[in-house]
Amino acid sequence: MIQACGLRKNYGTTVALDGVDLHVREGEIYGVLGRSGAGKSTLLRCVNLLERPTAGTVRVAGQDLTALGDAELNRARQRIGMIHQHFALLSSRTVAGNVSFPLEAMGVPRAERERRVGELLELVGLGGRGKDRPHQLSGGQKQRVGIARALAGNPSVLLSDEATSALDPATTESVLGLLKRLNAELGLTILLITHEMNVVKSVCDSVAIMSGGRIEESGTIADLVRTPDSRLTREIFPLPEPAPAGSVTLTFTGDPGRPGASQPVVSDVVRKFDVDLSILGGSIEELSAGAVGRLRVALDGQERSAALAYLRDSGLIVEVAGEAA
Ligand SMILES: Nc1ncnc2c1ncn2[C@@H]1O[C@H](COP(=O)(O)OP(=O)(O)OP(=O)(O)O)[C@@H](O)[C@H]1O
């Protein structure tokens, strides 16, 4: 749905994007994660051409935006909604007036606008709040207005620029829940940038990790957590590094056909084999891709090799420190 190839953006001598390739599939929620200054906002602004890239191409829904003139670009942008960290609402307008704003710009007749604004406010859980002013709303409600406004042009793509960074954890969760529902119900493709791992963990299907204007790592969350040395896996499941020589790190991926983190594989291995097992560290996370756990253990005893083989045969990813995978 979104395909960026070889994107570069220079501001004078600052290289904000240094050859970025991005592929967001239709219907997925794709997170771009990175520290301040990594280039995330620049990437997002280049996707809808609010910034013209210095080099590279951007295709959205099959259309090469970098090849369009201003008028065509404005039309194409109506199919790309955007929400912002600080909501960007007009304080002089009511809630309904804010949502109506892009429809007015598109020349939609008044009766049709009013019907559509009512639908959009219902969709984001703000039915009946149309006459309120933005200052009468909480942060989460303001962001819901921002989302309703972004959906006014019936976009196929929603871009989110740190949309939950100004919100408290409970409100963040409810806004993310809304985005997930819109993704599922409307088939909306969502590209969001964030510096919060929690956002990626709770809603994203895929992620790109940016640093210094480049993408360091990208892929589906499900694939990356199965790649034991991926940066995403190390950040979601921090375990002391380096692992003590001979220690064993077990990854429960929760894939169909593999044991989940709640299944008693570890107690089985101790019962079945002459081994001692002590836990050195670990955690379990409920990701959008399912429950995933990583556990580091010391495993010693006469039947260590047989126990390791059993763990592998049970479907766990087994890494032994100091041994090639
Ligand atoms: N309009 C601009 N003019 C000059 N330099 C810019 C401009 N916009 C961004 N930069 C620079 O480009 C680099 C990437 O900035 P960008 O805002 O894209 O990063 P970011 O990952 O979104 O960080 P943050 O989360 O702090 O916004 C930084 O070095 C920044 O200073």
Image (cartoon, rainbow, N blue to C red):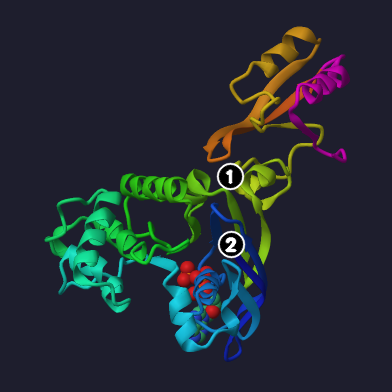
Residue segment shown in magenta: 301-325
Q: Residue 48: percent from the left, percent from the top?
A: 50, 74
Picture mark count:
2
State whether residue 125 is above or below residue 136: above
Which residue is under mark 1?
236
Q: Quick one: label 2, few (<14), some, or many (20+) residues within 10 Å?
A: some
- Residue plotted at (61% across, 56% down): 25
In the image, is residue 305 part of the stretch drawn in magenta?
yes
Q: Quick one: label 1, few (<14), some, or many (20+) residues within 10 Å?
A: many
State whether residue 35 is above or below residue 92: above
Q: State whether label 2 is within 8 Å of ligand 1.
A: no
Residue type highlighted by circle 1: Ile
Q: Residue 35: percent from the left, percent from the top?
A: 53, 64
In the image, is residue 237 part of the stretch drawn in magenta?
no
Q: Could you say which quadrant of the image residue 309 lies in?
A: top right
Q: Residue 274: percent from the left, percent from the top?
A: 81, 10
Query: Which of the numbered marks, if any, corresponds to residue 278?
Result: none
Instruction: Say whether residue 298 is left or right of residue 112.
Output: right
- Which one is earlier in the sequence, the residue at label 1 or at label 2? 2
Residue type highlighted by circle 2: Met
Query: Which of the numbered marks, if any, corresponds to residue 1?
Result: 2
Q: Secondary structure at mark 1?
A: helix
State whether residue 196 is above or below residue 80: above
How far apart are the alpha carbons under marks 1 and 2? 27 Å
Instruction: Say whether residue 252 is left or right of residue 134.
Output: right
Compare residues 39 and 243 and report the one nearer the observer: 39
* Quadrant housing the N terminus: bottom right
Compare residues 250 and 90 and report the one nearer the observer: 90
Q: Could you say which quadrant of the image residue 177 lies in?
A: top left
Q: Residue 206: percent from the left, percent from the top?
A: 60, 52
The reply to whether the C-beta atoms of the residues labelled 1 and 2 are less than 8 Å apart is no
Q: Secondary structure at mark 2?
A: loop
